């Protein structure tokens, strides 16, 4: 049975089973229990949010906190990334004032700092503006150094799907803009050609990475997923 065919009674039963499984202390496979099918069903029926969103958020939060540690406070992570963004902008400004032999390195340091700080911070700010709340920050990625934000699933479901989609896209968009914006700064500051070449390579590699990977399992994949949900809600016949 696909998610569109789940009834309210079946969703309630799935969520109850998930809660019992989490209380048992044993390893829990939410996918096997049908949790994500239930989430997809609720997305397609926003009128069910009042009945199910909080329970879904409770299950998702409990499973996440069991799986991921440490989790850092939302305000602390946002403050650190905001500080990093300010530092990166400061380094870009400093590029104009340092001796010419150091301008390229200063610009690259600013670009690297912005790339590390702005992705997650943009997700946070756009999500916050859309009315979402968050569980906390955690370190993600292959090397476990990428600051990532866990969204509260209840608030996520209560946010219109197109806003959810653009929240996912926002971080990816900013990350792609940073190298090319820094190229503009570099041209104005007359940095060495090798600096411009490095920034160009970084920008091209990031775009290629998005096309090859993020569209399948990343921000752009999530963007497409939520836009499809929005289309199905707008045109109910698309869900059948």
Image (cartoon, rainbow, N blue to C red):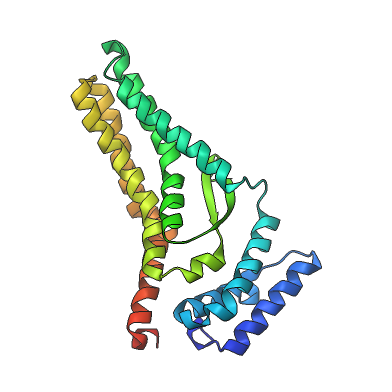
**Residue 233 makes an appearance in the image:** yes
In the image, residue 65 sits, relative to residue 16, either above or below, namely: above
Q: Quadrant of the C terminus?
A: bottom left
Q: Residue at x 45, y 68 (%)?
A: 159
Q: Residue at x 54, y 39 (%)?
A: 145
In depth, the one of 26 and 212 nearer the eye is 26
Q: How many labels does the image show?
A: 0
User: What is the quadrant of residue 220 in the picture?
Assistant: bottom left
In depth, the one of 234 and 40 nearer the eye is 234
Left or right relative to 20: residue 165: left
Left or right relative to 10: residue 172: left
Residue 236 at what x, y percent from top left?
Answer: 36, 86
Q: Residue at x 55, y 65 (%)?
A: 153
User: What is the quadrant of residue 76 in the picture?
Assistant: top right
Left or right relative to 233: residue 184: left
**Residue 141 makes an appearance in the image:** no
Residue 222 at what x, y percent from top left?
Answer: 42, 62
Residue 78 at what x, y percent from top left?
Answer: 51, 43
In depth, the one of 5 and 88 nearer the eye is 88
Q: Quadrant of the N terminus?
A: bottom right
Q: Which residue is drawn at 41% across and 48% down?
A: 122
Residue 170 at what x, y percent from top left?
Answer: 36, 53
In the image, residue 22 sits, relative to residue 91, either above or below, namely: below
In the image, residue 160 sits, relative to residue 190, either above or below, namely: below
């Amino acid at each position: 049975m696909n998610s569109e065919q789940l009834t309210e009674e079946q969703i309630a039963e799935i969520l109850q089973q998930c809660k019992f499984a989490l209380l048992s202390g044993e390893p829990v496979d939410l996918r096997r229990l049908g949790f994500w099918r239930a989430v997809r069903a609720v997305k397609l029926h926003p009128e069910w949010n009042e009945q199910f969103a909080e329970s879904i958020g409770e299950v998702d939060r409990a499973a996440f906190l069991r799986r991921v540690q440490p989790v850092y406070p939302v305000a602390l992570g946002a403050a650190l990334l905001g500080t990093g963004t300010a530092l990166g902008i400061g380094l870009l400004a400093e590029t104009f004032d340092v001796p010419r032999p150091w301008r390229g390195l200063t610009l690259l340091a600013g670009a690297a700092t912005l790339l590390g700080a702005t992705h997650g911070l943009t997700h946070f700010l756009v999500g916050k503006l859309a009315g979402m709340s968050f569980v906390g920050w955690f370190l993600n990625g292959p090397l476990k150094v990428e600051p990532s934000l866990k969204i509260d699933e209840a608030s996520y479901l209560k946010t219109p799907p197109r806003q959810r989609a653009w929240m996912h896209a926002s971080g990816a968009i900013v990350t792609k803009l940073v190298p090319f914006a820094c190229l503009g700064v570099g041209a104005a500051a007359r940095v060495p050609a090798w600096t411009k070449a490095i920034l160009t390579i970084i920008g091209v590699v990031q775009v290629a990475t998005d096309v090859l990977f993020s569209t399948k399992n990343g921000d752009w994949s999530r963007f497409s997923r939520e836009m499809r949900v929005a289309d199905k809600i707008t045109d109910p016949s698309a869900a059948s």
